[in-house]
Structure formats: structure tokens, C-alpha cells
């Protein structure tokens, strides 16, 4: 038996075998036993073969269907760990029993297959004619009915693994807005999206990825809105993935993103069905992966990372204000410590004199140069944050108390760091918490360090150099062909309504243009602000 | 291939504005004051207006050679050898200019960083320029779209200076007649001409050439307006006599402005726009140098040339011995190469129209 | 590959940082100068420079730190042939490098100013930063260095105390504050001379106070204006705020009535007529009656009119006497009359340009006209 070593992809092959249009139902076409492709006519042989192919798994349950205590006409097999036994007893075994009662033994023998198929009350059933379909079915949480002398088996959906129920997502919390979040089940998640998108144009295409995990991955888009070129590109990229397992959406993300070496994410993720639906409505494409509550969306633009779903649920002046605040926070979390370092070491002339005196008196007697002090504090802060995240919740709180209160206070009293620096680092931390997307926050958290080093080397010039470099870098990025900084660079004035501010819904008449190709209107062209009813409307003259 | 990249109308406007303002806002007051004194703002307006007109004349010229840059169609227009020679002069001038601007950045930074060697700044900026250039012209066009930050900051600076402007500093208007203003025009036209010639270079990348007029009018007006405002703000605050003694009047202006009682030191704002402005302007000169030199010798893989040429530019930038020599070189190139080249565009258009008519007549007779 | 280069670059930057390179200098290694003084010394050709350096930890006495209780600043003196040389000599006494960019005030001693200031301010005009907003003051009848020793009870440092003192003219109208930039502007033109506020020490040398305005001819101190003259001068330069004038009541016994200036506008009209230089000055002022030491009701229109006529006459007299003083005594065009003539008569100006202040300015005939309106009498209309 030759097993091909799974190739961990380094250089993607240009365009390997396409799995663009998988057959319904989508099951992997894989060989387990080259010789066991078809059924033999012997029930025992079939059952034995199945048992072998699963390595005599201990959770494989085989229940014989007997007419008389000695005469076995078939068997039901399932993996106990994946299946809801109640479904099997209610929808497979009970119908069989009832059939046996009703029809009598003799009648049952001959047209058994057809009779049984008609009497099984389980919702989903199909006929498998090869052994590997049967095995895949078993592994997918289905029950398999094999009849003696039959050339096919019935595969019945009976999956009943315990799942987390639909809860409010922890990462994207809203005050106003739907509270549902995705779960680990692809089926539930698809349902959550579909119930918000009651249109036949909503498309779900499923792929199976991962040589070992056989994970279902769904591609979601609105056929009448999404750019078919983008959809084709996403399909093409997914089809190129060769990987042994897909555990989380990031496995897919890193395999298909445009710019693998940048710190900025070019594929967004969300845990909220409403966000996903909104993205689909803007012409983007979603990817959902079985086993994780995070769905991927693309193409994305940079500005999306500073937007939250609640922006669209709050009243627009407040939403706009919060957005502007976020942009400031983004800048602050990127450059605040480096500006402080540059100001204190290179350009004290740029600090107003009362502040300068305060800072100077705080710096007096601190043993480290400001850059080193800043690096130290930033590293400590990142460490504290990581400790707080990974620890169990109760200990996490203790960590933050130790970090914030004891360590900070003691460091200042011992004159190891200056109070001004503590303030700067705390301000930076708060600013980085304001950024709603953790992925974008990661970029600023990492970039802060090179910025600090630049500031410590050549002051403000270094900081500006870094910012300009960053600007150029962001200009070079694309996400599925869409320029990363659009619609600002390149400018598209129509789409600017949803970037720095959030215009009222009736004013955003068209979808973001850079993502789209046609059907750009999303509100009726004469939509304006809602007006009070005129006298005529009220029936008066 | 350079000409296969496509830029939008917005980006074209931004490129024109960026090339027009560039780093000129730093030095524009000096040549304007030199001949026209306190009427220098008129020189700036007329200079950029002339530049705009020539830019408009460039459009029909460039449209006759779709997909070809200035460097490529010059030999077709004026004959092979003269065309190549003029193109070579244009390309080399732009190369030297990019070096001079690198140097200028280093000099201005030298005011603030007394001890840091200037190679840090020239090399630092060159790294950015190389990154842009190697990412392609579309990326540069997108980077340039940030140019509103520059002219809005300049406007902001001027607005802050408003309370301190003494309008009497501009009186009497036209004390010595119109002649000083006309005499001061060539350097101004050369400043605008840098943008016109740059447009001649990138014109084939424009995705909607029929709309180019808008980009020229908007771009040059914005650039001219910003510079005029800067002139008015500096001379209004300091007076013509004192401004003339300053090396970089806008830095003095930024130093002077005080907002409220705490927001001192607007140099910060100036520094913020100074680095990106230098990047844009150096790239604006480096791009034609790089791509044009390649096209001159029919070598189209310009990205391969970028490193050696960047090295050459860096080297040239450290050749001038002092500030005044650098300014001299800039003046010389502006007055004797950029200015005549810019002024020749109307004649080139005329020539091309005559050629076209001849060709058409030739075709007519053949049929 | 890219990542590798980035990492190498970051390491290089890190080590550069640790060694503390180039222009990096922590503020705790700098001596923040708040005020500079320029003084005469006995040695010929030498100039005395003094700096006042802030000691930040003594200035801030927040909860976190215990104040050492020392003086909030220290001062250092040294002399040299040039300013920069003197500065270098000062640095021999210092452990930190001098940081001049936040200097608030430049104090020049009266004797030095009388000999000319153009050559001493050259250094400041060349230094790259922070020079425009420095206030310039003249130390009246006292060595300038004495000012550096005085601790002002309200302000943190002498620099800002002096700065605020002279810019406080909006209230005391005793000085015309001048920044270094304005001074440079004035010195670079031939058609006007600067004025610089003068500050003096109290008799016990415990505090300083504004004393008036020093008058220069070109760059030399030639005299000074007292409070009343400064008020008139500010009125003429359109910079008067809160000026209080006192006149006698128009009826009844000659008791004083004080009026406060609300706003004023002065306009100039230069005329050259038959070789005579005329300057028509029109002052329009609005006053508020703030205090009267009579019990007569002055709110009747005719009384108010009489009062304002008195006031106008007084202003007119003040203006004429101030201009005459400037013309005869100082021969210094502190009113910028020259620039008005320049603007209106650019042709004739060319002939007068070189010797304007010595020759032509004293010949200008000023014709002042004042129009006063009293529009308010405070919250009460009649005395009790």
C-alpha cells in the first residue's frame, strides 16, 4: 500500500485538478482499499471490510437486522461517537420492526430493499454504491444500512454530536444589534446566514479540504451582486490548497491571501452572521469552515478593520464620531510612544514649556534612555496582556492587578520608569483596545516596536519615514485584486460616505464601487431623508 | 512595461498637484521676491497660469502619440538625432534634479539634526523612492493621492498666520511697473514646467485621456494657489525685506505661528508634510530619469535599472559643496533646460500639426 | 527574505539606539534656558551673557515627588568677545548642554542698548529655532543680570514672568511688547525705529516692574516714554487696550473723571504738499465712563458731549506732544510714518529713504484729529 506523503504547500502548483464543481452530495472521492471499491454480495464480507477499513474502531456499532434469530438480512452500522442513537432507533430500527410486523417474514425477503427505503423515516437518505462512499458517510456521522446481496447501501443522516448552542459572540460585542454568533457547526452557521438572506441568489458552494480532516468549507456569495471574477478567483485559490488538515479559518486564510508577508490582514474574519450578511450585500464573498465559528470575508479594504458592525446600528452622528475616534486611536497606538521618545530625545523644542518642565522633572534620575524605557514598558505591557488572556479568568484578573497596580506603582516609586512614560504606554494601550478588529490591532502592536527604534535613532524623521513607508506598503497591497486603501487611495468619492464617517442609510445609495462590477445601486435613487407625511398623505387637502 | 499601467483621472490630478507643489513651497518665495519684490505673488500666479496653458497644449500633442512617452515621441517629431539629444537632456536633468532634491531634504533636516550625517536622510529617502518605483507607477499614483494632506496643511498654516499678516506689506502694488514681474516669470514657469514635463512623461498611462483637461486645470490651479497663499502668508507676516534674508521662509513662518498659548512650534506640521513632499518630488524626478533613460535606449525592464541609477543619484546628491552651489545648479537647470523645454511644447504641437496635415495630404494624393 | 532583512535592520537600529547616537540627547541631559541677559563689562570689546536655567524637579512639587526645596532655577554668567563665545564660557560651568529654544525673554541692559543692539542680536537671528517669539526687554537703570536672580511669586521662572509682565500691556498699558521677530523686522527697514519695553527693579531689588517703553533710533536706545506717553503711543499704533484717561468734569468743580478705552481706530493720511510733509492722523475712540469723583449727573447728552470734547482735546494734545518729542528729542520714527509715505508716494520716497529719520521725519507736520464717543457709563447712570 502506497501512501502519498501529504505535501505541505510551499510553492503552489499553478493550477492543479480543479474541484470547482463538486457533485452533490459532496463527499470525498478517495480510495481506502483499492480492491474494496464495490460491494460484494456477501453481507458478512461487506461488514468485515468496513470494520477493517476503520481499523476495527471501538466506537463502530453494528446492529444486525434479523428476520428470525438466525436469519440476518442486513446490518446497520454507525459510529457511536458521532451519531444520535435516538434517530437510529426511531427512524431506522422502528420502521424496520414495524415493517417486519406488518408484512410478515416471507414477504419481507424479496422486495426488501425497496420496501425498507420507503419506510425509513429519516430525513436524508441516499444510496451509496462504493465502499469509500460508505466509509466517508460513516465518518461524517451517518448511519449505513447494508442489505444482504444488495449492491448498494443506504446512507442515512443521523448526526447528533453535541454542539454549542447559538450564543452571543465574545469577540464582537454590540450594545445594539443581533446577539447571535456563529457556532462550530457549518450547518448551523449556514442556517444563520440563510435566514437573514431569503433570496435564491444566495449561493453556498461546499468544498472538502484537508487530506486527513476532510473538513467542509463553504463559499458564500450573492450571485447577483458579487463580482464573478472575484468569486472565480476565490474558488481557484481554494482549489489550489493542498493541506493535511483544516482546523481553523486561519488555515484557509493563510493559504489564499494576497500578501502573505504583510502584517496587515487582507482577509477579514467575523463571528457575527449579521456582519457576514452585510459583507455579502456589499458584494463580498464569505468562506465558512466547519469546526470554527469564524467566517472569512474578502475582498477587504483597510478601513474595514476600523469599523464595527454596531456602526450601522447606532445613529449615524454617533457612529461617525466613533469612527473618527478610532482613526485617531489607530494612529495613537501606532506612534504615540515613538512620538514621545522623539520629542524627549530629539525635539524638546516641540513640546510646550510647561509640559516640557513636567516631563523633564519626571525624567530626572530615571536610569534608562527613553527608547529603552519605552521598549521595556511596551514589552511589559504586551507580556501582561498575554498573561491576562491565556490565564483562567480568575487568575487573569490577579495578573492585571499585579501588573497595573503593584508593578506600575512600584516602578514609578523606585524611579525606574518615569510617570510620563507610564501614561504614554497606558494611553497607547487604551488606543489599541479601541481598534475593533484584533487583526488590525496586531499590526499596530507589532509595528510599534520598529517605530520606537526609528524614533530613538533619528527622532521625528524616523517616525515620519516609518509612516510614509507604511503608506507606500499599504498602497502596494491588494485584496483579491481590490486596492487595499480604496476607496481613499485610489479615491472614489461616492464610496467615501462609509469610510471616515458613516452616512445615514438613506444616503448610502450605492455599494462600495471598488469591490463591485455591476448592480451598484442598493437604495432606490430617489431615497432621501425620511419626511413627515404631507397633508395630502393624511387625506386632507 | 511602464506604459501599460493605468491611472485614473483623480490620480492624474493628484500627480499634477504634487509635481506643482512638490517641495517648491519651501523655496518659492525667494525667486518670486528677487525680481518682483512684494508683488511676487503675481509672479507665482502668472507663472503657474502659463504652466497650466502649456499643460493644456500638451494634451493634443501627447494624444497624437498614444502609448508613447515624451522621450519616445520626441525623435519621431523632430528627427532622430535631435530628438534623442533633447530627450537625453530632459532625462538627465530630471536625474540631477532628483539628486538635488535629495540634497535639499538633507539640508533642511540638517537644520534640525545638527550632528546626524546627511547620508542618513538621503539614503533613507532613496529607500522609500526605490520602494515606490519598484512597486510600479500605479502604486505611485495611489501614494500621490495623499497630496491633499500637503496642500491642506499649507492652507492650515496660512490660516494660522492670518492674524499676524499685515496687509500693508503688499502695498504699494506694482511700485516699479509690470517689468519686474515679467522678469521674474521664467523661474516660476520652470517650476510649473517641471510638472508639465512630468505629465508629458506619464500621459500615456492615463486611462481617460479625453478628460485630461480637468486634471491639468485642477492640478495646476491647486498648486499655484497653495504657493501663492504661502507667499502671501510669509511676506504678510515678515515683510518683503526680512523674508528675503531668510533661507527657508516657511520654516520661519511655522516657527513664528503660535496657536492659543500652548500649540507652539508648528514646525512639527511642516516636518510632517516635508518628508512626504520630498518623497513625492524626488520620485517625480526619479521616475522619468529611470524609465526615460531605459526608453531612450529601448530597454524596457526599468526595474532592473533602479538600483544602479539610485546609487548614481545618491552619489550626485553629495557632490555640491554647499547650499549655495546646490541652489546654483537648480537655477541653472531650471532656467536653461526646463524653461526652454517647457516653452517649446507649443512649438512642438505646431510642428506635429503641420506634420499631420502633410501626412494627410500625402495620403490624399496617394489615393 | 524580506523578513530576514527587516530583522537585520531592526537589530542594527536597536544597537544604534543603545549607543545613543547623533542628535539624540535626553531632556534630562539638557539645561532648559528660560531667560538670557546681555550686559556690559568693563573690559572693552567684551560682552557679558547670563542664562537662567530651569531646575525642573524643583519647579514641580507634585504629590509623587518630594520637592528638594531648592531654588527653581540657577543662573550662570560669563563673558566673551562674541555672544557664542560667552555661551561657550558658560558651558564650562555646566554639566549639561544649553537648550536655548524655549527661552522666553532676552534682557538687554540699558547701557548696552544705548551703544546699539544690531550686532548683538546677530547670533540669535542665525540660530535655527525658537527665536521669533523671544520677547526683548531693556533693563532700566540696573544691570540685566540682576533680573535673573529674582524669583517671581506667581510665575514659575523669570523668563515667563517677564514675558507675561510686558505682554500684560492689555491691562497696564505701560509697555509695547516686542518680539525678536518684530525687532528684526524693524531693524531691517530704514523707515522706522523700534521701541522695546523697559523693566526696572524695585528699590529693594525684590521684584521687577514695567517702567515704560524705550525709544530707539535705528538700533540705539535714545530715550524712553513714560506711562502716559506709552498710552498715547499705543493709541497711535492701534494697540491700545484698556487705557484709562482722566479728565476734569465738564461742569461743577474741576473734579477728575476716569474713562476707560473700549476700542479705538487710528488712521493716517500722508500728504506731500508744496514740499511740506503733512501727516493727517484721525483717531476714533470709544470710551466707557468708569469712575467720577463728583456727584454731578453727567449722563445728559450735552454733558457727555462736553466730556468727550474735553477728552478729545486731551488726546489731541498728548498726540502732538508725543510726536514733537519723538521728532525733536529722539529723531526717531517710532510711529512708522515713513512706511505710510512710502506707500503713498513711492516716487518721492526714493529721495527721502536714506535720511528719513534724521532729515525728513522731524519735518513732518502732524495734524491730529480725535473723535471720542462715550457710549456707556458702567452699570449705574448717575452718582448717588
Image: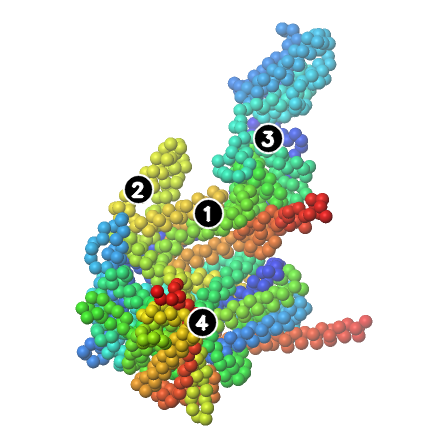
| Same chain? Circles 2 and 4 | no
Mark number, residue A443:
1
The spot of residue A506 in percent (x, y) is 62, 48
State the separation of the CA atoms marked 2 and 3.
Answer: 48 Å
What residue sits 56% from the left and 30% below the top? A185
Image side of residue B259 versus residue A288, left or right: left
Residue at the image position 51 percent from the left and 64 percent from the top: B151
Q: Mark 2 or mark 1: which comes first in sequence?
A: 2
Disc 1 chain ID: A
Identify the chain of the residue marked 3, using the numbered disc in the image: A
Regarding residue A469, the answer to whether it shows in the image is yes
Mark linked to residue A187: 3
Distance from label 3 to label 1 (Cα)? 33 Å
Q: Are marks 4 and 3 in contact (CB under 8 Å)?
A: no
Of residues C241 and C306, the one drawn nearer to the viewer in this rendering = C306
Neighbour tally class for label 4: few under 14, some 14-19, many 20 plus, Cα within 10 Å: some
* Circle 4 residue: B165
Task: Find numbered disc 1 in the image and state the secondary structure of the residue it sits on.
Answer: helix
The percent coordinates of residue A457 (x first, y second) are 36, 57
Residue B290 position in % (x across, y down): 53, 65
Q: Quadrant of the N terminus of chain A?
A: top right
Amino acid at each position: 500500500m502506497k501512501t502519498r506523503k501529504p505535501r505541505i504547500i510551499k510553492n503552489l502548483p499553478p493550477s492543479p485538478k480543479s474541484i470547482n464543481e463538486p457533485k452533490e452530495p459532496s463527499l470525498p472521492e478517495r480510495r481506502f482499499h483499492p480492491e474494496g471499491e464495490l460491494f460484494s454480495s456477501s453481507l458478512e464480507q461487506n461488514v468485515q471490510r468496513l470494520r477493517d477499513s476503520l481499523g476495527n474502531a471501538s466506537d463502530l456499532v453494528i446492529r444486525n437486522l434479523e428476520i428470525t434469530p438466525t436469519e440476518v438480512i442486513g446490518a446497520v452500522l454507525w459510529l457511536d461517537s458521532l451519531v444520535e442513537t435516538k434517530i437510529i432507533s426511531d427512524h431506522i430500527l422502528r420502521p424496520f420492526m414495524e415493517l417486519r410486523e406488518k408484512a410478515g417474514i416471507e414477504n419481507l425477503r424479496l422486495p426488501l430493499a425497496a420496501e425498507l427505503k420507503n419506510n425509513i423515516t429519516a430525513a436524508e437518505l441516499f444510496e451509496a454504491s462504493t465502499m469509500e462512499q460508505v466509509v466517508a458517510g460513516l465518518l461524517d456521522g451517518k448511519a449505513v444500512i447494508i442489505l444482504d446481496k444488495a449492491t448498494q447501501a443506504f446512507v442515512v443522516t443521523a448526526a447528533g454530536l453535541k454542539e454549542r448552542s447559538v450564543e452571543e459572540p465574545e469577540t464582537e460585542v454590540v450594545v445594539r444589534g443581533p446577539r447571535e454568533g456563529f457556532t462550530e457547526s457549518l450547518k448551523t452557521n449556514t442556517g444563520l446566514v440563510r435566514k437573514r438572506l431569503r433570496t435564491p441568489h444566495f449561493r453556498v458552494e461546499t468544498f472538502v479540504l484537508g487530506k486527513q480532516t476532510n473538513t467542509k468549507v463553504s463559499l458564500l456569495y450573492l450571485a447577483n451582486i458579487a463580482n464573478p471574477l472575484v468569486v472565480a478567483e476565490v474558488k481557484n485559490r481554494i482549489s489550489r490548497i493542498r493541506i493535511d488538515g483544516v482546523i481553523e479559518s486561519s488555515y484557509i486564510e493563510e493559504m489564499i491571501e494576497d500578501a502573505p508577508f504583510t502584517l496587515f490582514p487582507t482577509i477579514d474574519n467575523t463571528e457575527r452572521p449579521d456582519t457576514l450578511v452585510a459583507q455579502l450585500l456589499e458584494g463580498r464573498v464569505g468562506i465558512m469552515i466547519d469546526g470554527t465559528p469564524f467566517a472569512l470575508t474578502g475582498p477587504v479594504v483597510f478601513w474595514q478593520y476600523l469599523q464595527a458592525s454596531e456602526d450601522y446600528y447606532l445613529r449615524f452622528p454617533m457612529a461617525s464620531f466613533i469612527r473618527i475616534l478610532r482613526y485617531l486611536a489607530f494612529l495613537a497606538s501606532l506612534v504615540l510612544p515613538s512620538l514621545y521618545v522623539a520629542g524627549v530625545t530629539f525635539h524638546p523644542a516641540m513640546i510646550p514649556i510647561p509640559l516640557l518642565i513636567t516631563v523633564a522633572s519626571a525624567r530626572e534620575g530615571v536610569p534608562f534612555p527613553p527608547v529603552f524605557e519605552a521598549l521595556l514598558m511596551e514589552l511589559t505591557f504586551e507580556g501582561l496582556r498575554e498573561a491576562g488572556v491565556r490565564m483562567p479568568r480568575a487568575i487573569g484578573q490577579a495578573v492585571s492587578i499585579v501588573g497595573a497596580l503593584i508593578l506600575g506603582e512600584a516602578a514609578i516609586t523606585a524611579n525606574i520608569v518615569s510617570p510620563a512614560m507610564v501614561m504614554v504606554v497606558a494611553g497607547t494601550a487604551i488606543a489599541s483596545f479601541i481598534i475593533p478588529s484584533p487583526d488590525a490591532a496586531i499590526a499596530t502592536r507589532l509595528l510599534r516596536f520598529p517605530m520606537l527604534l526609528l524614533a530613538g535613532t533619528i527622532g521625528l524623521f524616523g517616525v515620519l519615514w516609518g509612516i510614509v513607508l507604511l503608506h507606500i506598503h499599504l498602497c502596494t497591497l491588494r485584496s483579491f485584486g481590490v486596492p487595499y486603501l480604496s476607496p481613499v487611495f485610489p479615491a472614489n468619492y461616492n464610496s467615501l460616505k462609509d469610510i471616515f464617517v458613516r452616512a445615514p442609510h438613506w444616503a448610502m445609495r450605492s455599494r462600495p464601487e471598488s469591490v463591485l462590477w455591476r448592480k451598484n445601486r442598493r437604495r432606490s435613487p430617489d431615497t432621501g431623508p425620511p419626511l413627515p407625511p404631507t397633508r395630502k398623505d393624511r387625506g386632507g387637502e | 512595461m511602464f506604459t501599460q499601467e493605468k491611472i485614473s483621472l483623480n490620480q492624474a490630478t493628484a500627480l499634477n498637484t504634487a509635481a506643482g507643489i512638490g517641495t517648491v513651497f519651501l523655496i518659492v518665495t525667494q525667486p518670486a521676491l528677487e525680481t518682483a519684490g512684494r508683488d511676487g505673488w503675481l509672479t507665482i500666479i502668472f507663472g503657474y497660469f502659463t504652466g497650466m496653458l502649456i499643460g493644456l497644449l500638451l494634451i493634443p500633442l501627447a494624444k497624437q502619440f498614444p502609448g508613447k512617452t515624451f522621450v519616445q515621441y520626441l525623435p519621431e517629431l523632430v528627427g532622430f538625432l535631435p530628438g534623442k539629444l533633447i530627450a537625453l537632456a530632459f532625462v538627465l536633468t530630471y536625474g540631477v534634479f532628483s539628486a538635488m532634491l535629495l540634497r535639499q531634504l538633507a539640508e533642511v533636516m540638517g537644520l534640525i539634526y545638527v550632528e546626524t550625517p546627511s547620508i542618513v536622510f538621503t539614503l533613507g529617502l532613496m529607500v522609500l523612492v526605490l520602494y515606490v518605483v519598484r512597486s510600479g507607477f500605479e502604486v505611485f499614483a495611489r501614494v500621490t493621492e495623499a497630496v491633499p494632506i500637503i496642500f491642506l496643511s499649507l492652507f492650515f498654516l496660512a490660516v494660522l498666520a492670518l492674524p499676524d499678516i499685515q496687509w500693508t506689506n503688499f502695498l504699494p502694488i506694482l511700485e516699479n511697473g509690470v517689468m519686474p514681474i515679467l522678469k521674474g516669470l521664467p523661474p516660476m514657469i520652470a517650476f510649473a514646467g517641471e510638472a508639465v514635463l512630468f505629465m508629458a512623461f506619464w500621459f500615456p498611462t492615463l486611462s481617460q485621456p479625453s478628460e485630461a483637461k480637468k486634471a491639468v486645470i485642477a492640478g495646476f490651479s491647486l498648486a499655484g494657489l497653495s504657493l501663492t497663499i504661502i507667499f502671501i502668508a510669509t511676506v504678510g507676516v515678515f515683510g518683503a525685506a526680512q523674508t528675503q534674508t531668510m533661507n527657508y521662509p516657511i520654516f520661519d513662518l511655522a516657527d513664528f505661528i503660535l496657536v492659543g498659548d500652548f500649540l507652539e512650534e508648528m514646525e512639527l506640521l511642516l516636518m510632517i508634510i516635508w518628508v512626504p513632499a520630498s518623497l513625492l518630488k524626488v520620485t517625480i524626478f526619479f521616475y522619468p530619469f529611470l524609465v526615460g533613460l531605459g526608453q531612450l535606449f529601448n530597454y524596457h525592464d526599468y526595474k532592473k535599472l533602479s538600483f544602479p541609477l539610485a546609487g548614481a543619484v545618491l552619489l550626485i546628491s553629495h557632490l555640491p559643496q554647499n547650499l549655495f552651489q546646490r541652489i546654483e545648479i537648480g537655477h541653472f537647470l531650471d532656467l536653461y533646460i526646463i524653461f526652454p523645454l517647457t516653452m517649446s511644447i507649443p512649438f512642438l504641437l505646431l510642428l506635429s500639426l503641420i506634420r499631420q496635415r502633410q501626412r494627410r495630404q500625402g495620403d490624399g494624393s496617394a489615393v | 527574505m524580506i523578513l530576514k532583512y527587516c530583522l537585520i535592520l531592526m537589530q542594527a537600529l536597536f544597537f544604534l539606539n543603545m549607543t545613543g547616537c547623533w542628535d539624540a540627547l535626553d531632556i534630562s541631559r539638557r539645561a532648559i534656558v528660560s531667560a538670557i541677559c546681555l550686559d556690559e563689562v568693563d573690559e572693552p570689546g567684551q560682552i557679558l551673557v547670563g542664562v537662567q536655567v530651569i531646575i525642573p524637579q524643583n519647579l514641580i512639587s507634585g504629590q509623587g515627588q518630594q520637592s528638594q526645596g531648592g531654588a527653581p532655577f540657577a543662573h550662570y554668567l560669563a563673558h566673551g568677545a562674541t555672544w557664542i563665545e560667552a555661551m561657550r564660557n558658560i558651558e564650562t560651568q555646566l554639566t549639561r548642554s544649553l537648550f536655548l529654544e524655549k527661552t522666553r525673554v532676552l534682557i538687554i541692559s540699558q547701557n548696552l542698548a544705548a551703544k546699539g543692539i544690531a550686532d548683538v542680536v546677530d547670533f540669535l537671528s542665525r540660530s535655527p529655532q525658537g527665536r521669533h517669539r523671544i520677547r526683548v526687554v531693556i533693563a532700566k537703570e540696573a544691570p540685566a543680570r540682576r533680573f535673573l536672580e529674582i524669583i517671581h511669586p506667581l510665575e514659575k521662572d523669570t523668563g515667563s514672568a517677564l514675558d507675561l509682565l510686558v505682554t500684560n500691556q492689555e491691562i497696564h498699558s505701560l509697555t509695547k511688547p516686542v518680539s525678536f521677530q518684530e525687532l528684526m523686522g524693524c531693524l531691517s527697514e530704514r523707515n522706522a525705529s523700534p521701541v522695546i519695553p523697559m523693566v526696572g527693579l524695585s528699590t529693594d531689588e525684590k521684584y521687577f516692574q514695567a517702567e515704560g517703553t524705550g525709544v530707539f533710533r535705528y538700533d540705539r536706545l535714545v530715550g524712553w516714554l513714560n506711562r502716559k506717553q506709552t498710552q498715547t503711543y499705543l493709541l497711535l499704533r492701534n494697540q491700545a487696550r484698556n487705557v484709562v484717561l482722566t479728565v476734569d468734569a465738564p461742569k461743577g468743580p474741576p473734579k477728575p473723571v476716569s474713562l476707560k478705552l473700549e476700542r479705538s481706530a487710528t488712521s493716517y493720511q500722508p500728504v506731500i504738499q508744496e514740499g511740506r510733509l503733512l501727516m493727517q492722523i484721525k483717531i476714533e475712540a470709544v470710551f466707557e465712563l468708569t469712575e467720577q469723583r463728583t456727584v454731578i449727573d453727567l449722563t445728559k447728552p450735552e454733558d457727555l458731549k462736553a466730556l468727550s470734547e474735553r477728552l478729545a482735546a486731551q488726546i489731541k494734545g498728548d498726540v502732538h506732544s508725543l510726536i514733537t518729542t519723538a521728532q525733536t528729542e529722539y529723531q526717531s520714527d517710532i510711529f512708522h510714518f515713513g512706511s505710510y509715505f512710502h506707500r503713498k508716494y513711492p516716487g518721492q520716497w526714493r529721495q527721502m529713504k536714506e535720511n528719513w529719520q534724521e532729515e525728513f521725519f522731524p519735518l513732518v507736520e502732524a495734524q491730529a484729529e480725535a473723535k471720542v464717543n462715550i457710549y456707556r457709563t458702567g452699570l449705574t447712570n448717575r452718582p448717588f
